[in-house]
Image (cartoon, rainbow, N blue to C red):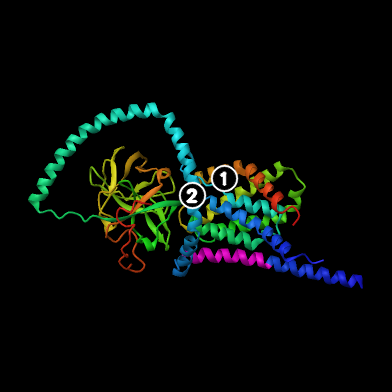
Amino acid sequence: MKPSPWVRMDTWLRHFVPFSITLVLLLMTAVPTRFSGFAGITPMLPLMGVYYWAIYRPDLLPPWAAFALGLLYDIVSGTPLGVNAMVLLLVQGVTVTQRRFFLAKTFLVAWWSFALLAGAATGLSWLLVSVISHHALDPAPAMVEYLVTLGLFPLLTWVLARTQMAFLKDV
Amino acid sequence: MRGKLSGAVGRLATIRLLAQRFAFLSLVAAAFLLMILGKADILLVERTRVLIVDGLAPILDVMARPAGAISEVVEHVRDLANLRAENARLKSDNLRLQHWETVARRLQNENAVLHEQLNFVPDPDPAFITARVIGDLDSALGQTMLLNAGGRDGVRKGQAVLSGESLVGYIVDVGDRSSRLLLLTDINAHLPVMLEATRTRAILSGDNKDRPKLTYVAGNPNIQVGDRVVTSSSGAAFPPGLPIGIVASVADGTTRVEPNVRRTELDYVAVVDFGLGGILPFADKPPPPPPNPRRRGGAEN
């Protein structure tokens, strides 16, 4: 039996959720916070989104979507074009190839792997921006950003898991 | 029959996998190409970038509002906690400033008399636009902010951005309704400055840290911690004398400047048109901005 147009549209909209939620995470990084302690530290929220969906629903956030999000991130944040596009694309690609491994494992394993992957991603973006701007950037803020990102991972994963349960349980 | 079918399915799967690999690699190549294109300063790339940010500006604007309200509450709580210490500080400040007020009044009168005697031509009053910060893009990789005013409000590339009396940065990208402010702390920010007391000229260069450093210091001056740093007239970018900050540390030949305004305090800023060239050469000479109710004292926003 063919599903009715409404059902199909509903499914189609639900399939759009991973992309939209990662887009929201991306825009959230731009919100001015004005907390004096956190100035200059932007956790890599889109990276977490891409990582999560690459494990649980790689069909709904394919490589081109990761690329597009990365490019948009570059445009919004003013980093050299292509840097985040490259980083998010590679994170998506690497995670997808390892997803069988993640699916069977505990949360701690996912966290640990994220730590490795996010570390590589931070290093790569730092390197790319340094090469493009012909100037070795100070690595310290990048390290802090990385640690803050790691600290936020459980919270973000919880939010994303709730979202997945709410919207994508059976589609 | 079945073997044939599974063979076909297998081949199809192989082709699909290859296609996926190919697509992935093309995207990697595209990212590389973009890095090179972005480096080449192509006008089309620049325009597209600005256009997309412009499109997102209303969304960012909406998202910034509740965040602003929350920070305000946090700020209030913090203020309450510091009330006592703040009060004591303000009392002592007030005593000191009363003395300065007397001095300033005397100097003002003297200055007015001297101006008259010399037929001094005063600087024109600059036009300004008040804009709200809708995006704070400070990260380890760059320090810019998005403002909710753009070309249609009269913002032009290279214009100075002030908070209160202090220079905080300048405009680098202008969309129709949004613009990008490059903070003085960004790695791409370089500005001719001078030390107010000694008139020593230097370039203030950001390096993505909280305190930008002084480079190309003219001569061999004796720089003291606490010296005031202001804009200089070199390069005819900004009028001389706009305050920027004070020298915070002098160590190993590196002088760092503490800006007067912390970027967490930036909420509304003034984009000022001094009628000078600005720090960036204009890509195309802008037409005179249309008369706009938001210009000059447009503090309603």
**Quarter of the rendering containing residue A90:** bottom right
Secondary element at image label 2: helix
* Foreground label between 2 and 1: 2
Q: Nearer the viewer, residue B135 or A171?
A: A171
Q: Residue at x 34, y 42 (%)?
A: B260
Secondary element at image label 1: helix
Q: Where does the image place residue A39, in percent across and percent down from the top left?
A: 47, 43
Residue wearing tag 2: B64
Letter of the chain that mark 2 sits on in the rendering: B
Q: Residue at x 21, y 35 (%)?
A: B100
Residue wearing tag 1: A146
Q: Which residues are magenta?
A: B22-39
Q: Where does the image place residue B298, in percent across and percent down from the top left?
A: 33, 54
Disc 1 crowd rating (10 Å Cα; few below 14, some 14-19, many 20+) is many
**Residue B220 sits above or below residue B33 on the image:** above
User: Which residue extends farthest right?
Assistant: B1
The answer to whether marks 2 and 1 sit on the same chain is: no
Q: Is residue B35 magenta?
A: yes
Q: Which mark is residue A61?
A: none
